[in-house]
Amino acid sequence: QVQLVQSGAEVKKPGASVKISCKTSGYTFTTDSINWVRQAPGQGLEWMGWIGTYKGDTIYAESLQGRITLTRDTFTKTAYLELRSLTSDDTAIYFCARDRGIATPGLDYWGQGTLVSVSS
Amino acid sequence: DIQMTQSPSSVSASVGDRVTITCRASQGINYWVAWYQQKPGKAPKLIISGATNLQSGVPSRFSGSGSGTHFTLTIRSLQPEDVATYYCQQANSFLRGTFGQGTRLEIK
């Protein structure tokens, strides 16, 4: 069965960086892409970025350009999100999700979420 | 970027009612819309893909329609377990995947 398992909660100070992993299983990793989405406390969903797992190409939200990097490791079938220069506004739950593109427009499987808390 | 404007922001309805949530895209996106249901403390769940395709296991009282810039999610006969927040999303993988602001659905 398809699974996306994310790394554990993180506590960071302002100005620091965080790197979250999303380990996949149950499907061919390089066939489908990965999106990252975050949700601040009590707020809606914010799309952060997309990575094509075959070539490693990326698309980032304009609001995060320059602070975000998405990467993937095709051998371990794991996707990564790195966010730099953290502020309290980055406190949120971060989700990875599978994107099947034309086959199923939408994000059909999600990780369990990773809480990132940014506080001095 | 394509903006997704979702309405209403909240709705309260009775069990058995028909509920409609609307999403408008700032430019035409063909059928590239997905709808999600999110319950508190959980990851979002894809319920409609490609504007109209009901995902496996999702009750048939849910349906999606629309194309271009105007999309709707309809719940034909509201059930207590449908209480959740619903989001639309621009789902073209080659564009930024903007979400709507969300619609909080409650039971009267």
Image (spheres, helix red, strand yellow):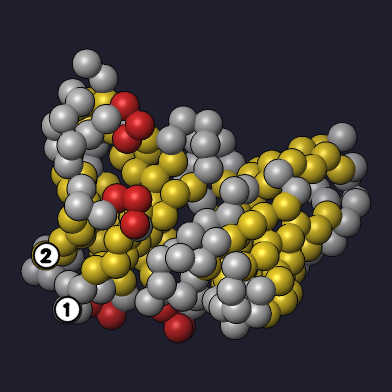
| Residue topped by disc 1 | A55
Q: Can see residue B57?
A: no
Q: Amino acid at mark 2?
A: Asp
- Compared to residue A36, the image places residue B14 above or below, namely above
| Residue topped by disc 2 | A73
| Image point (25%, 73%), residue name | A52
**Residue B88: % across, % down:** 60, 60
In the picture, the quarter occupied by the N terminus of chain A is bottom left
Name the subunit of mark 1. A
| Image point (60%, 78%), residue name | B28
Query: Can you tell which quarter of the image residue B10 is in?
Result: top right
Q: Nearer the viewer, mark 1 or mark 2?
A: 1
Q: Amino acid at mark 1?
A: Lys
| N-term mark: 1 or 2 | 1
Q: Secondary structure at mark 1?
A: loop
**Residue A90: % across, % down:** 32, 35
> Image check: B41 left or right of A23?
right
> Image check: B58 left or right of A24?
right
